[in-house]
Image: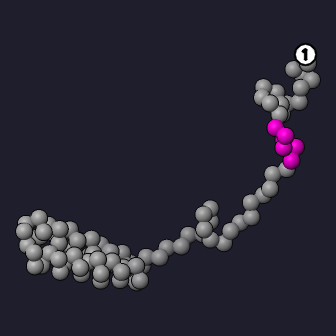
Amino acid sequence: MKNESEVPKRTRGRAARADATTPRRERRPTSRGAGSTEHVSGLSPMGVGLGVAGAAVVVLGLWLVSRGDMTAAPLLLVLAYLVLFPLALVR
């Protein structure tokens, strides 16, 4: 049995890996995507305002549905989902 001081430090206490001496590849930086340090914000203040307005209209529409209104509620929900939310994403 080998003395512990004779065993290389890399393998002491665990089995040696076959690729222990193979150098690791360095990651190349990507311009965009996962791991990117670049911050891209797609929402302007107007877009945030339209998104908040859309959320408020959805809450109002759902509240009206719960109260039994079947005229204004669907119109408000359509306005929020088909007009305000898409505009919030574009602006």
Residues in magenta? 17-22
**x%, y% of residue 78?**
23, 79
Which residue lies most toward the top here? 1
Left or right placement of residue 43 versus residue 15 in this view: left
Three-letter residue code for mark 1: Met
Is residue 18 a member of the stretch shown in magenta? yes
| Image quadrant where residue 19 sits | top right
Pinpoint residue 18: horizontal percent, then vertical percent: 84, 40
Q: Residues within 10 Å of mark 1 (few under 14, many from 20)?
A: few
Left or right of 88? Residue 24 is: right
Q: Secondary structure at mark 1?
A: loop
Does the rendering let one see residue 37?
A: no
34 sits left or right of 41 in the view:
right
What is the quadrant of the N terminus in the image? top right
- Locate residue 50, reporting x and y percent: 31, 78
Residue 46: name its quadrant. Answer: bottom left
Identify the residue at image location x=12%, y=79%. Answer: 72
Question: What residue do we see at 11% from left, 70% from top?
Answer: 64
47 part of magenta stretch: no
Q: Residue at x 24, y 81 (%)?
A: 79
Would residue 42 be seen by someone viewing this image from the given angle? yes
In the displayed structure, 66 sits above or below 12; it is below
Q: Position of residue 77 (x, y in %)?
A: 22, 76
- The residue beneath circle 1 is 1
What residue appears at the point 82 percent right and 27 percent down from the top-left corner? 12
Q: Nearer the viewer, residue 65 or 34?
A: 65
Which secondary structure is most common in the magenta stretch? loop
